[in-house]
Image: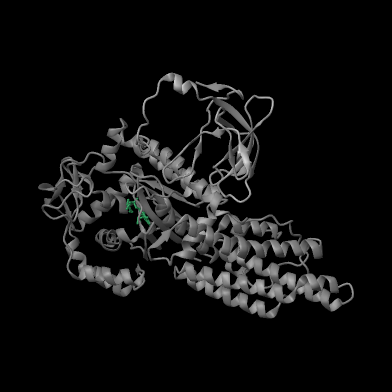
Amino acid sequence: MSKYYLTTPIYYVNAAPHIGTAYCTFTADLIKRFQIQQGREPVVLTTGSDEHGQKVERAAKAIGKTPEEYATAIANEFVRQWQALGISVDHFIRTSDPKHFETVRDLFERCQKNGYIYKGSYTGQYCFHDELYVNDAKPGDPCPDCGRPTETVTEENYFFKLSAFGDKLLELYEREPKFIQPETRRNELIAFVKQGLNDLSITRTTINWGIPVPVEGKHVFYVWFDALISYMSAVKDREGIWPADLHLIGKDILRFHAIYWPAFLMAGGLPLPKQVFAHGWILVQESKMSKSRGNVVRPGPIAEVMGGPDALRYFLWREIPFGQDGNFSYDALIERYNADLANGIGNLASRTLTMIQQYFAGVVPASAGDPRIAEGAAATANEVTSRFLDFDFTRGIEAVIAFVSSIDRFIVERAPWKLARERQTSPEAGERLAETLYTAAEALRLVCGWLYPVMPASMEKIWVQLGMPAPLAAVRAGDLRWGLLQAGQTTQKPEAVFPRIEAKVAIPRMQELEIVEKERQNALLGKKPEAAPAAPASPVIPIDDFAKVDLRVGQVLSAEAVKGSDKLLHLKVDIGEAEPRTIVAGIALAYKPEQMVGRKVVIVANLAPRKLKGITSQGMIVAASLEGGSPVLAGFLEDVPVGARLK
Ligand code: MSP
C-alpha cells in the first residue's frame, strides 16, 4: 500500500506546549497509528518549530539570549514533551535548520522563474513599540499585542502574485472536494476566495531573524512563506514522501494552508497536498486559554496523575467531535475516565482475565465464540474504520464503547460463575463457560486493536495481559477479525490498567503540578516567577512576639483520613519529643495519607490544643495557603534533623 504523510503545524517558540497544541499533535499520532493499521506504508508524521520573526528576536533579547539560543531551548522543550507524551514523531523540523533554508529559497526561485514574484512597495500597519507588522489591520487599528495604535508604513519588498490564483484555487476545491475539511470550513473558504485575492508581500527588510532572500539588499522571508515550506523540508531527504496526504491544523490557520500554500506550490510547479483538516479549539472554562486569563492547562501534570497521557487523549476525542470547539475540565476528564475506562474497558479486562485465571488456569479456552457477538464485532470493526477514516473519532469510539457494553451484558446473561459450578456435573455447562470466556477475551483483543490508535500505551498493557505474542503496534486491520485469538494461549494475572481515580485527590494534585510546570516553562521562556496575589500585609510585630511561636521540624510517622471529613488528615508527627504529637490538618484534598508518611514538615508546636472532629490536635502544620487553591506544605531542600527549631 502507498505512503501516508501527515503533518502538524510547526509551533511558535514563544509559548511552550499546552493541551491545545498537544490536541493537534495527539490527533496526528492517532491518525498515524490508524493508517499504519490500515496498511499504509510508510506512514510519516512530522512536526516542528516555527522560529523566525521579530517576536522571537525580541523575546530572546529581553533575556540576554541570541534568537538561536532561545529558539533551541523551546524547540528542545517541544521535542522532549512530545517524546514524554509518547507521540511517535518521525521528523522534527526547525525553521532555523539550513536544509530548510534551501527549500525556501528553491521555492522562491521557482516562483520567480515562473513569473509570480515582483518587486513592489508594501503599505501596511506597523506597531513601532513591538516592531511588528500587523497583518489585516486597518489604519488606526490597535496592535493586538500591546494595544497601542498602529501606524501606516510603506516598505519596498517582494510580492507573490496571489491574485493570479483565485480561479485555480476554486477549481482545486471543486476537483478535490475533500481538500478542505470539515465541510463547513470549506464553504467559508470558498466564499472568501470568491471575493478576490490580493497579492502578498513575502519579504521583509525590518527583521533580522529570518531566512535571507536570494536577492539584492537585506530582505528576509515573511514568516508564513518560510513556515509553510517546512512541510517539504521535513521530508526533503526522503524520496517519494512529498506531497503531504494530510495537513492537520487549527481552524485559525486555515487560510494560510488552503489558500497561500497551494498557491505557492502551484506557482512553483510542485505537487499539492491532498487534504487540509482544520480542527476546533480546546477551551478551558469555556474560553480560549491565555496566560493573562491564567487558564492554560498543560498535558504533563495530567499525564502524571492519570497514569500516562491516554486518559487525556481518550477524553479529547470522546468528548469533542473533531472539527468543533470543546471544553476541557478536570472534573469532566475524571468523570469520563471513571465511567468509560475504569468501569467500562478496565472492568471488562479485569473480569475476563480473572475468570480465565480462575476457571481455566490462565489459558484461553478453545471455542469459536458466540456467533451473535461475532457479528456485532464485525459491524463494530466496519463502523470504527469508516468513522476514523472520516476523522469522526467521537463516533468511532462510541461504537467501541457500545460494543464493550454489549459484552458486559453478555457476561451477566451467561453468568459464568454459575456455569463454573455446574460444569462438574454438566459437560454442556463446561462448553458454555469456554464459549463465554473465549468470547469475552476475543472481544477484549479486538477492543485493544480498535482503540490502539486512541490509547496506545494502555491498550498494549491489556494486550500483553491477554498473552498476545506479537506487539500490538504490529497488528494490521486484517488481524482484527473475529476468531483469530488462539486457544491455548497463556494469559497473565490481571493488573488494573485504569484504576478508579478520586477527583477529590487527583484534581488538587494536578493543579499543584500545573503550577510547578508553569513555573518551569516560564523559566525556559525567560519569564520571572509570578508573584502570588499579595495578601494584605499584617501589622508589624517585635521580634519577641515572633520568638513566642515555637516552630519545629517534624516527621510524619502515620497518616489517615478523619472519618466524616473530606478535608482533614489525622497525623502522628515526631518532633523529637518522647511521644509523637497528634495533629489534625486540613490538607486531605491536596495530600493522600500515603504521600504524607515519612515526610518532613514544619509544626507550630506551642499552639493551644484544639479538638477537631473529636480528635485533639496538639499543634498545627505549616503550609502556604493559596487563594482558591489547595495548601502547599512547607518543607526543606536540604536534610534537616527532626526537632530542629525554626528561628
Ligand atoms: N507557527 C504557526 C503555524 C505554522 S504551520 C506552517 C502557528 N503556531 S501556533 O503555535 O500559534 O499554533 C499552532 C497550532 O496550535 C495551530 O493549529 C492552532 O490552532 C493550535 N492551537 C493553539 N491553541 C489551541 C487550542 N487551545 N486548541 C486547539 N488548538 C490550538 O500558528
Please state which of residues 451 and 208 is positioned toward the viewer in this rendering: 451
Q: Residue, x 59% and y 58% (percent of image)?
A: 473
Residue 58, compared with residue 123, is above or below; it is above
Q: State which image quarter holds ligand 1.
A: bottom left
Instruction: Tell me where residue 167 sits by quadrant.
Output: bottom left
On the question of residue 154 being in view, the answer is yes
Is residue 57 left or right of 393 when viewed as pictured?
left
Given the current orientation, which residue lies at the most extreme top position? 544
Coordinates of residue 130 in the picture (x, y in percent)? 20, 42
Counting the numbered discs, the total is: 0
Please state which of residues 304 and 162 is positioned toward the viewer in this rendering: 304
Coordinates of residue 42 in the picture (x, y in percent)? 50, 59
Is residue 404 left or right of 148 when viewed as pictured?
right
Instruction: Tell me where residue 117 sits by quadrant.
Output: bottom left
Q: Residue, x 50% and y 38% (percent of image)?
A: 632
Is residue 217 left or right of 69 when viewed as pictured?
left
Coordinates of residue 597 in the picture (x, y in percent)? 64, 37
Please state which of residues 256 and 20 is positioned toward the viewer in this rendering: 20
Given the current orientation, which residue lies at the most extreme right position? 425
Q: Residue, x 66% and y 74% (percent of image)?
A: 409
Residue 207, compared with residue 456, is above or below; it is above
Coordinates of residue 60 in the picture (x, y in percent)? 30, 35
- The colour scheme of the drawn protein is one colour
On the question of residue 366 being in view, the answer is no
